Image (cartoon, coloured by chain):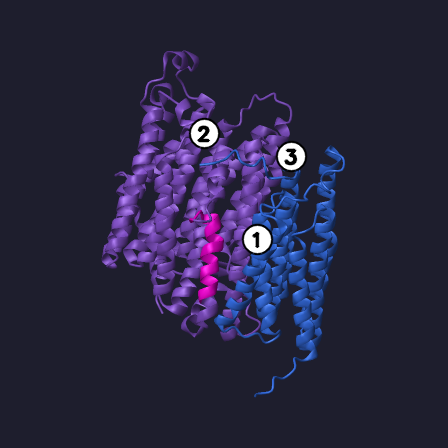
Amino acid sequence: MAAVAAPSVFAGAANVISVGVLLAEFGMFRQALLRDQVRLYAAQSGLISVLAIVVAAARHLPELYVLAALSAGLKLVIVPLVLRRLLRGAGEASPGEGWSDIAGTGALSLASTVLLAIGVAAFGFFSIGALGIRSPVLPLTALAISVSVALVAFVLMIMRRDVASQAIGFLSLENGISLTALVVAAGLPLILEVAFLFDLLVVVVVFGLLIRVHHGRAESLSTADLTSLRG
Amino acid sequence: MLAIIVILLGAPVAAALVSLRAPLAVAQAVTAATGALCFALVLALVPAASHHDLGYLSYLRIDAVSVVFLLATSFLYAAVAVYSVGYLPRDSRSPGFTRYYRRFYAGLNLFAWSMLAAPMMSSLALLWIAIEVTTVISALLVAIADTDGAAEAAWKYVLIASAGLGLALLATIFAYYAGAQVLGEHYNLAFGPLLHAGARLPHAPVRLAFGLAVLGFGTKMGLFPVHTWLPDAHSEAPTPVSALLSGSLLAVSFYAILRYYQVAVAALGPRFPRDVLLVFGVASLLLAALYLLDQRDYKRLLAYSSVEHMGILAIGVSFGAPIALAGVLLHVLAHAAAKGNAFMGAGVLVRKFGSKRISAVRGGLDLLPWSGPLFLLAVFALSAMPPFGIFRSEFEIVQGGFAASSDAGAAVLIVLVTLAFLGLSAAANRMLFMPADADAAARYSRGEPSAWMVVPVAAGIVVLLVLGVHPPAELTGLLTRAAALLGRVA
């Protein structure tokens, strides 16, 4: 029987952090408060920045330190601030709402949604192995997990029927893509990474503005009323 | 040439900034002048791009394919800028109108700017960013009417298109991975070197990148099954924005798919990318043809017609023959003019009859002495009737299908296009030829809402006639070179 070598400390750390990112994605299914949803997104983004720092140190890629710092500044500080600022206005229009009315907006029960997400995540995890992609900087488990994160983010966007969770679903999809980029495109020029981050900021502002418009008209974050355009 | 490109990238931004502060008449004049200037500048690029590729400052790259898409966007930009003079009532006293028109004109100019920038980008990363910018600006423009329908359409659009562009970003990253295997870790996603690397690129990541790009950018192009945002956004946006969305934005997303197509053909050979496009194209065309048969809202009717034409483009590329590729590029131009015209005509109908329902519009030909016949001609043009440009382009595409021995594909194309023609012409017949009842005839007086809403539509018909009857030699040279670039096989 062939002996299986234990993973190195670096590979172990990278895999643990990647799994943390996926668990945070699953955690988003059960959040009942928008504030907690945003915090969980920030935590997930923080894990990806930590992974970028680990890769930068282990693989001697100093540019990744800058990327980790910029990414953390944007996703841990600016995005939550922008969302809070734009949505607090929405909350004031109907006190108590805005921060608390996204519980139970799932199209399926929580258990069914999580089961579906597990199936989708498993598909993503195992299908990536067939592609024969090799990464010079991270173990392939991280790539498989990043694809799972992206697919589970789609489940979140499809299954939650409130605009805030759908927006967070999109942002966490972007986190999954960031994780993919870290595995297969760690050498991508910093200027392009910065452009992507700036673009994310613009998208967050537009999402926030449109959530505000929606909340202003429907007096709720639910998408239950968005059914007039058909055919 | 660099000066032309700098002005093309700078003038719309300057016009947007002026529009944010200026009185309405100034904003209208500046926007119309900028639109006309951009169209003239793109025309000046045609001779050079017909002979060689242009590259500047390492971020800008313009070849014949780019210029075809720049022509479509800049023509529509100029047309809707003139049309908007009549579209926005100058004498409006409604509260908030000043804020509305400032946002409208700033958004319109920025939207045109982002669509002009996308085909000029030298790298797949910058192309993705430019297309993402088109999404966020146009989503805000869709929401600008501040109605329930507009808010719903804008939310669906921004969410679905952003998710699609998420997939397109994954495609970009896998394209980087493929490029870095051959060109080294410091590869910057520039398109030229990637195409040059061609057959040396690893197959699996290129295949994955192409599939994701078709699905991701296809979301914005309106390909089935990721087209669902399109009818909502096109029907709820202000008419000038609908014209730009349909005639230009969808084409810009198609441009991105074409770039990935070139890379995929160079790396994998033609079979896989053509099969993928054929499946998406036929499915989109079938869905649109069926939806066109049973529409109650004429702006949604035109939106589904866009899905139909995007399907035709995808099928045309899948044929791969040079004549089909030249037809596809001509189709991009003719569709921009025809669909812009149809939406601008629809905007006149909305203004006249106060409704987007087909059943609410009767006697259009009698009540609108100019816009009625022009709308009819636009519908004929969209239905590929001779002598308009779409007849020529679809003829070339079908000819290319037979030349490439894709007889079944060409036959399916002809059948589904005929089905779509039935839907479009039946609706146009009801709106234009069925006489208004006595009540309606008494309510609406005969006449045009504004001459500004007629002039650009008439110009569009002239363009469609020129494209159909006798395209200028310079344009034919451009299309031939662009088709040759797209047809290069490893």
Question: How many angstroms separate mark 2 from mark 3 (CA)?
Answer: 27 Å
Any part of residue B59 in sight: no
**Along the polypeptide, which appears first: circle 2 or circle 3?**
3
Which amino acid does the dot numbered 1 rest on? Val
Tell whether B307 sits left or right of B434.
right
Q: Does residue B214 belong to the magenta stretch?
A: yes
- Residue positioned 64% across, 23% down in the render: B95
- Determine the residue positioned at 62% across, 64% down: A179
- Which range is magenta? B207-224
The residue sitting at 25% across, 59% down in the picture is B404
Q: Which quarter of the figure has residue B155?
A: top right
Give the label on residue A41, or none: none
Q: Would you say residue B80 sits in the magenta stretch?
A: no
Q: Which chain is drawn using purple?
A: B
Residue at the disc numbered 3:
B21
Amino acid tagged 2: Gly
The crowd level at tag 1 (other Cα within 10 Å; few <14, some 14-19, many 20+) is: many
Depth check, mark 1 against mark 2: the one in front is: 1
The picture's colour for chain A is blue
Instruction: Say which residue label 2 marks.
Output: B347
Determine the CA span between mark 1 and mark 2.
Answer: 38 Å
Residue closest to the eye, B415 or B262: B415
Q: Which mark is residue A155?
A: 1
